[in-house]
Image (spheres, rainbow, N blue to C red):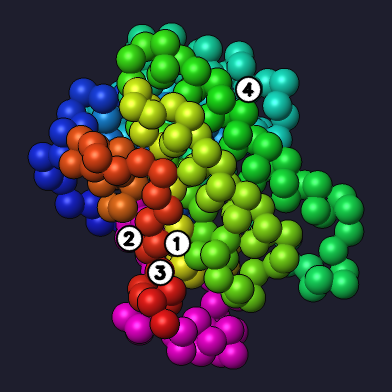
């Protein structure tokens, strides 16, 4: 899928952004969108080859890119990775937490290992990346943090129970940190509905699943990664300077019903 990015004056020119899960899907779209808005980008993911490809696209937009190989589930590796990212350009102005996973198990089939894996990436990994970056932002005088949650964190969908629970936890973490870290660091979240990526293309291609999603979505289409990227850019930028502690739903109207 070709990603089309519309560049505009955003107030992000010259800022430094770190994006986890930057190697594909929503994370890649966000990394490229922030680069188009004027940010130098630190891309964090597990695949060095995929990060290199994203880096080439960021640099083609005239911005700098630093690849950082990290599995956010390995909490012990996070401090050194964030040290490297922070030192690269002398700080981070924007953190976007995208890294996450879903294990598609029915409620009676979820195993303790699957539950722990989901929470280790989606909640624990996200929290400790945020802790490392947020602490530095507080000491440095400011910053904006945006976490990608999910419609499934507030509405029951066909996502697995473990995934829904993990995203609900992230929404509350967002609210709590926004209060604790105000007014220096703003902390918000973006909650996508169903967004078409390589990871869920086969699931959405199933006629019954696709019909379920379209039937719940007033705008009548599945979301695209760039739909999420635009919302993240708003929350990252000075345009949202009076916004913190919010979970902005990007769901085609699903939650309005």
Q: In whole angstroms, how far apart are the C-alphas of marks 1 and 3?
A: 5 Å
**On screen, 119 above or below 254?**
above
Q: In whole angstroms, how far apart are the C-alphas of marks 1 and 2?
A: 9 Å
2 or 4: tag closer to the N-terminus: 4
Q: Where residue 11 sits: x, y (%)?
A: 16, 33
Q: Main secondary structure of the magenta part?
A: helix
Q: Where residue 6 sits: x, y (%)?
A: 17, 52
Is residue 109 within the magenta segment?
no
Point out which mark residue 192 bears. Answer: 1
Which residue is the site of mark 2?
227
2 or 3: tag closer to the N-terminus: 2
Q: Nearer the viewer, residue 28 or 236?
A: 236
1 or 3: tag closer to the N-terminus: 1
Q: Are marks 1 and 2 in contact (CB under 8 Å)?
A: yes
Residue 86 appears in view: no
Q: Dot 2, crowdedness within 10 Å: few (<14), some or many (≥20)?
A: some
Point out which mark residue 251 bears. Answer: 3
Q: Are marks 1 and 3 in contact (CB under 8 Å)?
A: yes
Q: In whole angstroms, how far apart are the C-alphas of marks 1 and 4?
A: 26 Å
Instruction: From the viewer's perspective, tell me whether residue 47 is left or right of residue 227.
Output: right
Q: In whole angstroms, how far apart are the C-alphas of marks 2 and 4?
A: 29 Å
Q: In whole angstroms, how far apart are the C-alphas of marks 2 and 3?
A: 9 Å
Which residue is the site of mark 4?
78
Residue segment shown in magenta:
201-229
Q: Are marks 2 and 3 in contact (CB under 8 Å)?
A: no
């Amino acid at each position: 899928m070709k990603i089309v990015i519309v560049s505009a004056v955003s107030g992000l020119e010259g800022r430094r952004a770190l994006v986890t899960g930057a190697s594909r899907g929503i994370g890649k779209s966000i990394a490229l969108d922030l680069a188009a808005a004027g940010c130098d980008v630190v891309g964090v993911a597990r695949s060095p080859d995929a990060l290199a490809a994203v880096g080439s696209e960021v640099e083609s937009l005239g911005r700098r890119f630093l690849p950082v190989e990290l599995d956010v589930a390995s909490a012990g590796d996070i401090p050194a990775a964030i040290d490297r990212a922070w030192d690269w350009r002398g700080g981070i102005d924007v953190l976007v937490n995208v890294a996450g996973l879903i294990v598609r198990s029915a409620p009676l089939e979820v195993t303790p290992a699957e539950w722990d894996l989901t929470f280790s990436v989606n909640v624990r990994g996200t929290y400790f990346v945020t802790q490392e970056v947020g602490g530095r932002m507080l000491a440095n005088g400011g910053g904006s943090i945006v976490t990608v949650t999910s419609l499934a964190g507030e509405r029951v969908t066909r996502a697995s129970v473990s995934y829904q629970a993990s995203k609900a936890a992230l929404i509350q973490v967002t609210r709590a940190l926004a209060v604790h870290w105000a007014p220096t660091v703003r902390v918000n979240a973006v909650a996508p509905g169903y967004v078409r990526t390589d990871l869920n293309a086969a699931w959405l291609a199933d006629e019954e699943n696709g019909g379920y999603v379209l039937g719940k979505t007033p705008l009548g289409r599945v979301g695209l990664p760039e739909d999420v990227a635009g919302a993240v850019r708003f929350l990252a930028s000075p345009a949202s300077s009076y916004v913190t502690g919010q979970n902005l739903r990007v769901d085609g109207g699903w939650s309005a019903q």
